[in-house]
Every structure is written in structure tokens, then in C-alpha cells.
Amino acid sequence: MQNLVKHVDVLTQGLKTGISGLMNLTSQATESASGVFFVNFNQDCTSLAVGARNGYRLFSLNAVDQIEQIYENDSEDICIVERLFSSSLVAVVSLSSPRKLKVCHFKKGTEICNYSYSNTILAVKLNRARLVVCLEESLYIHNIRDMAVLHTIRDTPPNPLGLCTLSVDSDNCYLAYPGSNTMGEVQIFDAGNLHAKTMIAAHDSPLAALSFSQSGARIATASEKGTVIRVFNVSDGTRLHEFRRGVKRCVSICSLAFSADATFLCCSSNTETVHVFKLEEPKEPREQVSNIGSKPQNHGMPKQAVEDTQGGWMGYFSKAVSASANYLPTQVTDVFNQGRAFASVRLPFQNRRNVCAITMIQKQLRLLVASQDGYLYVYSLDMNEGGDCTLLKQHRLDGQPDLLPDSSPRLPAAHAPAQPCGSISSYAGILKGHSPDSMSGTDSEKFHEMAAATESPPKGGFRFDDESEFPPVTQKTE
């Protein structure tokens, strides 16, 4: 009994220290200030979910000047909350029951079902076909229409961060997770047809962040080094793009996110800078300079060099590096072949976990950053020129009105205390012994509302938000 009490105390302390996960924002250093454990955008970036010590909140992201709080629950401390697109279906995990997943209808405040697992839930991902629960050394794939367990991936490499991502497109329903805890291998699993698809050797160091494009055709990756971002073709593992985020040795990548059309990719870290990369196709070599008009003065330079300097001295220098690739070190040529940021944001803080997204708001492309400090930052993004992004608005995520009545941003006065690079400590693996509960009875009809939520648009006259058509169903647990 004493040992059990000791384990519970250790678990409680671990929970207060933080949930380890890509989108989880728990931090012992700032938890008392903001109370925010978790922030994440939904699949199409139309809403924002916030988990905190006093419950969870859902916000609508339809305007720059204000965000509408569409729901607030203050029943318990929530460390994970994921919303299915714009439906009323949410999956939540609380700090007090970290091994239990609840699927709820938030507008009614009712619980559809719950499942208990053998270990701490580190991440939950969902689309209209699947719901994936990530534990430290296993992944459970559920059919979201009735929550039946379709497949279990066991004995995965230790994944204390709960790092995984599920494609938004249920027709290309891919799940990605680390294939190694010592190297940056990405395992792609076909969650629709339930079989392994491919393995991508993305980095030499362990993975830190993963993100699919909206169509599921591409995947972006970053390693613990945090200096290089790569984009791969999911179908065959071909490397499509490589970008250099920076040269600092101690950088923890917090999140990666594609724009809806996969033209842009944003990357945030524990530094104050967010980078935006433009995924342009490689340009064809420049055509020979036309003889029409005055000829450029070459001052004795080779013809090819003259053409390259017309594109700028960096073009000439890059060409020279490419021509010298046979005798220059690989590390040198790789640096010059990597793309640079198209645009960037300088955040008013650092050393705080955050999540970024690129989305259209009021017909304008915006860069969003939701942070552990309890604020959402909205930035402009020039699709043509790039460059520095302007902070347009800052919104509070604690349910209180913004401090300033107008649209001008409020900047935090000071940075958070510096924290060492690397992941937040994990509390996974402390408690074991329970498996996901089997379905009680013939419950398929009870999940009719869940099936309707996965339809886009809903079929027939059924409306998922209609209170009268959503009876609560409680899943029994041990």
C-alpha cells in the first residue's frame, strides 16, 4: 500500500512537471502563471483548443480582431483536448486520469465513451476515419465511428514525447511516428488499410517534430538538432525540400505546419523566431542572355559567370559551390544547397513551448502562434514578398477579455526564465496494468452521432450539432 501511495505521489509530481508531447505546453516554470497545459489547432485551423488546470476552452478563428470562445468546461484539469474539425466531437485526457481517454459532445457536455490504457496517454490524433492514441511504446488505432480498436502497434521505439502525426485527409489516412529513438527514422503506417507503408531515413539525430500536408502527400520533419527542416514525398520517401532553420546547436523544435495548399511551411522552436519556408519547385537553369539591347560588361569574367551575376552574386557563388562539389566537403555544399526562410516572426518571448499554423482568415493568409504563456498571436504574412511578419493582434486564452480594447498588440514585458534545451520530462511508464476496454454489448447504434460527425458534409438530414439527436453513451471501464 505504501509503495502504491509512493507511485501515486511520483505520478502527481510528474504530471505537474509536464505532459511530454509535441503540442503539449506544460511547464513547471510557467504553469502557475498561465495555467495552460495544452494548446492545439484543429485539423483545418478553424478553431483552437486550450487545456488548462481549470478545464478546457474552444475558440473559433474566424477574425483577426477577436476570437470567439465557443465553449468552456471547468470540471477538471485537462492536459490533452483535440477537436474533430468543426464538429462537437472532442477527445480529452485529464491530469487526474492520464490513462483514460474520454470522447465527448462538448455542446451537450455529455460523454459518449471512455477508454483506459496500460500507460499514460501522450498524444491523441484524429481525422474523420481514425482516432489514434499514442503511448510511450505503443499506438492504438480506433475506428472513429464506433471507437472499435482496429489495430495496435506494439513495442515501438521508446517515444516519451508522444511524437506522432495523423494526416488530415481520411482518404490518404497515414500515421507517422519515430522508427528509432537514436536516429531520425520516420515510420509511415497506412492507418486506413492497416499496414506499414514505408520508412524514411530523415535525419541522423532523433526526431523532434513531424507534420503531414493537408492532402497527406508530403511530410515535414525536424530532428533534435533543430537546424534543418526536410520535406519528403510520402509515397516513396523521396526528399523534396531541405531548409536551414538556423545554426544554433541548442534548439528544440516545437511544431511544424503546412499551409492548406502546401505552398508554405512554418516552424517554431524554443527560440524567439518562427520561420516560414516557401516550398517552390526547383527552377530551371537560366536561359542564355538575349543579344537584344546593350550587352553587359563582363570585365573579363567567364560568360557563365556573367549570367549568374545577373541573378545576384549569391547565385554566382552558389554556382561556384556546385561546380566545386567534387572536392569541397559535403557539409559545405549541403549548407549552400539548403533553402532559407521566406518569412519570419520575432516573438515577444522565448523558452516557452508553442504551436504554429498558417491559415486563411478573412481571405488573408495569417501566421498563428499559440503559446504556453496563455496567448494567441496573429501575424500578417505577405505571400509574395515574405520578410518580417507584423503582429496584428494578441488574444488571451484564459477566457478573459483582451487587455486592450483595440486591435493593437500587447507585448509581454519580460522573457520567461531560460530553460535547458530538449524535451520536457516524461511521466509515462509509471502505472501499468489496464488495457483498452472492450465495447460493452452491441453499441454500434449508440455511436450513430460519431459516425455522422465523420461525414463531410453530413449525409441526409442528420445534424451533429442537434442536441436532440445526440444521446450520451458511457463506456464502462475497469
Image: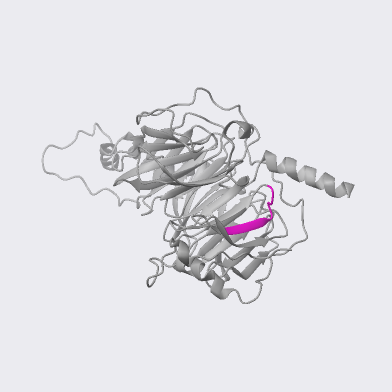
Which residue shows up at 57% across the image and 28% down it?
Answer: 416
Residue 283 in picture, x, y percent from top left: 31, 50
41, above or below 458, in the image: above
Would you identify the image quadrant in which residue 147 lies? bottom right
Q: Nearer the viewer, residue 294 or 281?
A: 281
Which residue shows up at 12% across the image and 37% down it?
Answer: 294
Q: Is residue 102 magenta?
A: yes
Tell me, what colour scheme is on the image? one colour
Region in magenta:
96-103
Which residue shows up at 69% across the image and 40% down it?
Answer: 16
Residue 84 in picture, x, y percent from top left: 48, 58
Residue 341 in picture, x, y percent from top left: 41, 39
Q: Is residue 4 magenta?
A: no
220, above or below 461, in the image: above
Which residue shows up at 30% across the image and 36% down it?
Answer: 312
Q: Quadrant of the C terminus?
A: bottom right
Q: Is residue 386 left or right of residue 198?
A: left
Residue 454 appearing in the image: no
Would you identify the image quadrant in which residue 378 lies? top left
Q: Nearer the viewer, residue 20 or 88?
A: 88
Q: Residue furthest right?
A: 2
Q: Is residue 475 left or right of residue 110?
A: right
